[in-house]
Amino acid sequence: MSEVTGGTTAERMEEWQKRREHILAQGGEKAIEKRHAKGQMSARERLEYFFDPGTFSEIGMWVRNRTTAFGLDKADIPAEGIVTGFGKVNGRDVVAGAEDFTSMMGTFGEYHGKKLSTAIDFAKDKGWPFVTLNDSAGARLQEGMDTLESYGWTFHSQIQASGIIPQISLLMGPCLGGQAYHPVMMDFVIQTRETGFMGIAGPAFVKTQTGEKISLEELSGWRSHAVKSGQTHIVAEDDKDCLDKCKELLSFFPSNNKERPPRIECSDDPEREIPEFDTLIPDEPTKPYNMYPLIKKVVDNGHFVEIFKDYAKSAICGFARMNGRPVGIVSNQPLVMAGVLDINACDKLARFIRFCDLFNIPLVSLTDCPAYMIGSQQDWNGILRHGAKLLYSWADASVPMIGIMIRKSFAGAHYGMLDKSIGADFIYAWPTARVTIVGADTAASIIFAREIRESENPKETQAARIKEFSEMYESPYQAAQRGYIDDIIWPHDTRKLINRSLDVLDKKWERDFFARPWRKYSNINL
């Protein structure tokens, strides 16, 4: 549209109205109809659905690119292909940036990046969560170095905001190339099942550079990241489901790292007993059982929002409430690889623990873990380095930490799943817990190897020694005698004791964090 050159007040107001309506129309009716035909909303429709009615205020509506090369002087890119602003989500302040695919395919240029970076800085300075709605064809190549530099502004802003405000990325369309670093550097990624794509390069570029032929779905779809790469935390069915899941996730978080997470009224008795727990654990120590029913019975009203549901499934993590308080739940899953901690499970849990600590969310660990995964492939791929991430995460944390030893807590996994010496405030064990350096069968085969080998009846001697070691060291009583376990409890009292412990630890993070020696941060084994 032409520049304003003069005119009466009425003419200027009419010009303002036309310009504003043009920007609000985004890429036009036909472009928006194409979105609807694919089951997608436009950028502005998404923001309208996400924010409480009438609360969204836009920032930077009038921004436009300054490049004139390769036809951009004639290009019409309303709002620079990204709508940014702030408003209320369930009554709480949130800042958001929604890429507009109908405006030059939402390509990421200099001022597109400047708007995004500015919105993140604004959110950080206000202490409000930031949400980005990704839907872009990628870099605006016509702007050359200006586009490249704008990525740096964005990355710098979100890294500076990391740990200060919660950041959530919604993959609602394509997000390819250098731009794909933006979502994975945020705290959580929610990807729509049919329309969300993320990758360092698209199929055409991959074919040109490597010769590999692969579809966009296979290369960059939800299975690639929710199941294989561990970069998508939650999968959504469509736009509305994605936005609803984001709202639900935000409800567990404080607005920033100086606040407590929001506590709500609880209709579930915090002292509720759970009789089913008394018979939950199989008599055979190697027989698996499902940890999900235990988690859902112990938390408020069975409400558990899982993170990384489809990735590293031998471990479980997610958000729930205990007597109205948000808590992070960390657990093993005995149904998958006996609940062992492999490289991916360690990465999954360590990042989750650190997020909870950054935003003052108490942690509850439910342990049934035989070990860190062993073997050449795990060793060669760095299980020690990845396993150490869990140790750093627990030891660095200043939030309340409560551990329940359900069954196995062996070797290094004893610390990887939380114990007193690594930083737990309270450790409780069920009578079914088996807590020791290694399992009795392994210990006996090493300690008594010669005796077993040279005995008249090796199998009988081995069985006797295993029984002896198990009775002496595998039960939770020795650990309790040494003070490493605070109490051995009836399983049905688990919810009651977690809630009582959280009451006692209510202001722990406010007191303990500032009593620690000063340092920038721990040098975690990244």
Image: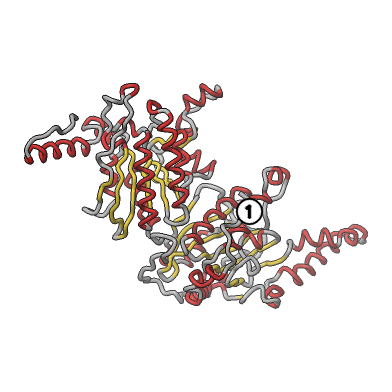
Estimate the x, y position of residue 103 in percent, counting from the top left. 29, 32
Estimate the x, y position of residue 525 in percent, counting from the top left. 63, 51
**Observer able to see residue 394:** yes
**As drawn, 41 above or below 269:** above
The residue lying at 59 percent from left, 48 percent from top is: 344
- Residue occupied by mark 1: 341
Left or right, residue 300 beside residue 287? left
**As drawn, 355 above or below 237:** below
Callout 1 amino acid: Leu
223 vs 128, nearest the viewer: 128
**As drawn, 352 above or below 47:** below
Estimate the x, y position of residue 138 in percent, counting from the top left. 40, 32
The residue lying at 46 percent from left, 33 percent from top is: 177
Quadrant in which residue 42 is drawn: top left
Image quadrant holding the N terminus, namely top left
Estimate the x, y position of residue 472 in percent, counting from the top left. 76, 72
Q: How many marks?
A: 1
Left or right, residue 151 beside residue 452? left
Left or right, residue 174 beside residue 14? right
**Observer able to see residue 273:** no
The residue lying at 82 percent from left, 66 percent from top is: 465
The residue lying at 29 percent from left, 60 percent from top is: 91
Circle 1: element type: loop
